[in-house]
Amino acid sequence: MEFGELLKQFLLDLQRLFRSRITDGNLTLPQVLLISCIPDDGIDMTSLAQQLGVDNSTMTRLVDVILKRGWVYKTKDEQDKRINLLHLSDKGEHVQEIIEEKLDHLGIQVNNAVPTEDRDEVKEILSAFHWSLSKMLLKNESLV
């Protein structure tokens, strides 16, 4: 299997795992990713859209749904009032905690599926792979 095909399969398998183990009747996969990416001190909508790899209009639609559910709220940036900052509400923090617990549980399950003698090596390889992807993304962002 070529590397590109492996990447596609890896993405599809991860999405399937996330959908079956992390999402539920109240949360879609995009909502899980959105909520799990909001830091304690909030984040501006454009940065969040870039982090998730979606355009601003898609981000606005995603945020509108979780705003209505009371999981997040918006404030204006102190320095630039044109910028909307997104924060988790108490309800949203609870949802984020549940997501993190499910992610931790999934991580343990995946780790346990790897032979004990290979776990450290697999973790190192995945860390190096993540680092490579991060560098690629930074190069792409600097070209824009």
Image (cartoon, rainbow, N blue to C red):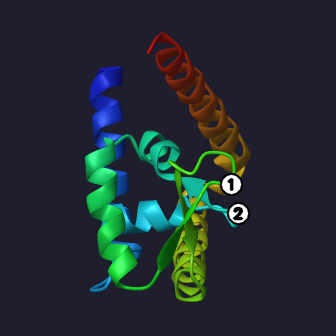
Please tell me which residue lies in front, 143 or 119: 143
Earlier residue among tags 2 and 1: 2
* Residue 88 at x, y percent in the picture: 57, 74
| Residue at the image point whose x is 37% and y is 75% from the top | 66
Can residue 23 be seen here? no
Q: Which numbered mark, 2 or 1, is in the foreground of this view?
A: 1
| Residue at the image point whose x is 42% and y is 46% from the top | 49
Q: Please state if 128 lies on the left or on the right of 55 as rendered.
A: right
Residue type, mark 1 in image: Glu
Can residue 14 be seen here? yes
Q: Rate crowding at label 1 as few (under 14), some (14 to 19) or many (20 or more) other CA atoms within 10 Å.
A: few
Q: Secondary structure at mark 1?
A: loop
Please tell me which residue lies in front, 79 or 115: 79
Q: Is residue 15 above or below residue 51?
A: below
Q: CA distance from mark 2 to mark 1?
A: 13 Å
Determine which of the numbered discs, if any, sits on residue 78 in the image: 1
* Residue 20 at x, y percent in the picture: 32, 73
Please tell me which residue lies in front, 121 or 116: 121
Q: Is residue 65 above or below residue 55?
A: below
* Residue 52 at x, y percent in the picture: 42, 46
Displayed quadrant of residue 60: bottom left
Q: Please state if 140 lies on the left or on the right of 124 as rendered.
A: left
Q: Quadrant of the N terminus?
A: top left
Q: Secondary structure at mark 2?
A: loop
Determine which of the numbered discs, if any, sits on residue 62 in the image: none
Residue type, mark 2 in image: Asp
Report which residue position mark 2 lands on.
41
Tally of numbered discs? 2
* Residue 105 at x, y percent in the picture: 57, 75
Displayed quadrant of residue 76: bottom right
Q: Please state if 118 lies on the left or on the right of 86 as rendered.
A: right
| Residue at the image point whose x is 58% and y is 24% from the top | 132
